[in-house]
Amino acid sequence: MSTQIAIRLPNDMVAFLDKAVAQGKAPSRAALVSSALEREMRRQAAEQDAAILRERGSAHDLDDLVNWSTSRLDLPD
């Protein structure tokens, strides 16, 4: 489900949106704005996770799992 909203943006931001759409970097203004908001939501969630880790310390009980997982990756030297 989606909700249509109206927002006011500075002219330079609208020009940026229009240029990105014209260059094929985004299918629409709304898609680019949605993408930016999703990225901001992920950034804020990561910031909250980092704050929790700072407060509680790292989860040492997961160290073995991380080591096992990374040992399975094919990483270049």
Image: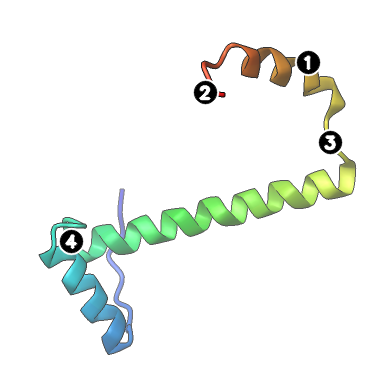
List x then y, in percent, for residue 10: 32, 87
Element at label 3: loop
Sequence-wise first label, 4 or 1: 4
Mark 4 to mark 3 CA distance (whole Å): 41 Å
Mark 2 to mark 3 CA distance (whole Å): 27 Å
Residue of label 1: 64
Residue at screen point 16% across, 64% down: 21
Tell me the quarter of the picture where residue 17 sits: bottom left
* Label number found at residue 34: none
Assess disc 1: are there few (<14), some (14-19) or many (≥20) residues with their C-alpha within 10 Å of its C-alpha. Answer: few
Q: Residue furthest front?
A: 77
Q: Is residue 56 left or right of residue 39?
A: right
Say above or below: 67 vs 17.
Answer: above
Of 64 and 1, nearer the camera is 64
Mark 1 to mark 2 CA distance (whole Å): 22 Å
Amino acid at dot 2: Pro
Way the structure is coloured? rainbow
Amino acid at dot 3: Ser
List x then y, in percent, for residue 38: 43, 54
Assess disc 2: are there few (<14), some (14-19) or many (≥20) residues with their C-alpha within 10 Å of its C-alpha. Answer: few
